[in-house]
Image (cartoon, rainbow, N blue to C red):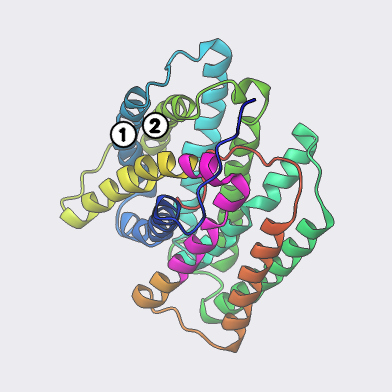
Amino acid sequence: MTSQRAHPPFLSWRVLVPFLLTGTIWGSTWLVITGQIDGVAASWSIAWRFLLATPAMFLVAIVMRRSLSIGRQGQMLALMVGLAQFCMNFNFVYRAELHLTSGIVAVMFGMLMVPNAVFGRVMLGQRITRGFVIGSLVAGAGIALLLIHEGRTAPPFSDVGGGIWVGIALAVGGMLSASFANVVQANEAGRRLPMVSLLAWSMLYGTILDFALAWATAGPPTFPTSAGYWGGIAWLALAGSVVTFPLHYNLVRQIGAGKAAYNGIVTVTVAMVLSTLFEDYHWNPVTISGAILALVGLVIALRSRHSVPPRPVAAGGE
């Protein structure tokens, strides 16, 4: 008779350390992005980031002994994920932070589970429960309060060609792109592929598309001289993309996808704290109420039992 190996307790260091580390790193990425778009074309910052992250992810796949041969169908899937996740999503998000504080964009992305559920229902036939809907509505109400405050403190149109509504639209575009990537790779063909290998090929295709988009929209490559800029590139590429993914997927194996998803709460909390410290984000009864509602709603939605969610391509941070 075979016996199943028990999952380690959540408060053991083998679980708690990577859980907090991934949430904290992903929470920091939202603020670091602001330094990547300060006087530098967003598209080129994204291109440089994944030019560094892509070979590192291939190296991770090799070290983990995952086959890089994913077949023609896998390559087509990687191309779709690369376009949606590593090109469209990031280009939307970086531009959204020209109009909204990083913490607000992070909180909005905390609602990624909603388009995930909708796309999962349409494309994969996954069930959506009443508890999930209730939690999502509560979180949405909290985010609405945060955005109302943002609208009151920001002009309707800014010097960069828009305002809060442009930022919201860009953030939603990023969410939809990331969600499509999450769901499309969770089909039967995607589940047969090693995740790290799929990520590596997807990043490669995304990088190629990022360079093409950057050249078309921002002209020839730019090479900022600031050490802080390139330090941010390294942090986003290596810590925010390459280090955290293996840790996160190991957590999924150890404690399950449901519990591992709770590091999104850590991510949102860290992002809002950093936005308060470094972006002069001001708290008042409206924003405090909004943040509490958003976090409570996320917890309710995450605790709701529903069919297996799409295997995430990028969870938590940007």
Vertically, is 28 above or below 117?
A: below
Vertically, is 18 above or below 67?
A: below
Nearest the eye: 303 or 309? 303
Task: Sort mark 1 into few (<14), some (14-19) or many (20+) by Cα contacts within 10 Å.
Answer: many
Residue shown at 63% from the left, 49% from the top: 258
Q: Which disc is residue 103 wearing?
A: none
Q: Which residue is mark 1?
A: 51
- Residue 14, horizontal then vertical, whole percent: 41, 50
Q: Which disc is residue 207 wearing?
A: 2
- CB atoms of marks 1 and 2 within 8 Å: yes
Nearest the eye: 16 or 229? 16
The disc labelled 2 sits on which kind of residue? Thr
- Residue 63, horizontal then vertical, whole percent: 32, 26
Nearest the eye: 318 or 316? 316
Q: Is residue 296 found inside the magenta-colored segment of the image?
A: no
- Residue 224, horizontal then vertical, whole percent: 20, 49
SS for dot 1: helix
State the quadrant of the N terminus. Answer: top right
Q: Is residue 101 visible?
A: no
The residue furthest right is 130
> Which image quadrant is residue 123 in?
top right
Q: Is residue 259 found inside the magenta-colored segment of the image?
A: yes
Main SS category, magenta section: helix
Q: Which residues are magenta?
A: 250-272
Vertically, is 246 above or below 276?
A: above
Q: Is residue 272 visible?
A: yes
The disc labelled 1 sits on which kind of residue? Leu
On screen, residue 182 versus residue 195, left or right, reads: right
